[in-house]
Image (tube, rainbow, N blue to C red):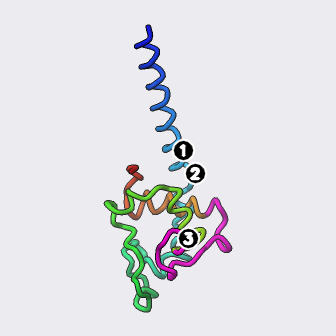
Amino acid sequence: MKKLLSIALLLIMTLSVAATISNAEEKGNAAEGKVQYDNICASCHGATGKGDGVASAALDPKPRDLSDAAYVSTLSNEHLYKVISEGGPAVGLSPMMAAWSGVLSEQQIWDVIAYIHKDICKCEYKGN
């Protein structure tokens, strides 16, 4: 009976963690995120996220390649949110990555994150 209870508890905890991760992915609307990405992010990161936007020629370091699924899948949604909202220096990255919280709402940032995952890197956060 103890073993069955332990297995049930483990199953409940696993499903709870999976639901939390899934809920984080569902916070944003990728279609809405594309609009914001095209208006704000594409000038540096490029239309397809490769870091080759028109402004990238003047930037050092160059913008991150967001189409690199192997890299982007290692970044949590919360990390991406912080980078977009507070800028690169907030997470030890380049000061060339501006903070967008004064321009984008919380929902719009989640939308951009959904768009990056769904259409640019075509990946999901894989955890540590």
Q: Secondary structure at mark 2?
A: loop
Q: Could you tell me which residue is drawn at 49 percent across and 44 percent down?
A: 21
Q: Which residues are magenta?
A: 89-108
Q: Is residue 92 magenta?
A: yes
**In the image, which disc is placed on residue 90?**
3
Depth check, front residue: 41 or 19: 19
Label 3–label 2 contact, CB within 8 A: no
Label 2–label 1 contact, CB within 8 A: yes
Q: Is residue 111 magenta?
A: no
- For disc 1, the marked residue is 23
Residue 114 percent across, percent down from the top left: 50, 57
Disc 3 marks a residue whose amino acid type is: Ala
Disc 2 marks a residue whose amino acid type is: Lys
Residue 94 percent across, percent down from the top left: 47, 78
- For disc 2, the marked residue is 27
Q: Could you tell me which residue is drawn at 55 percent across and 76 percent down?
A: 40
Disc 3 from disc 2: Cα separation: 22 Å
Task: Give the number of the mark in front: 3 or 2.
Answer: 3
Residue 38 percent across, percent down from the top left: 51, 74
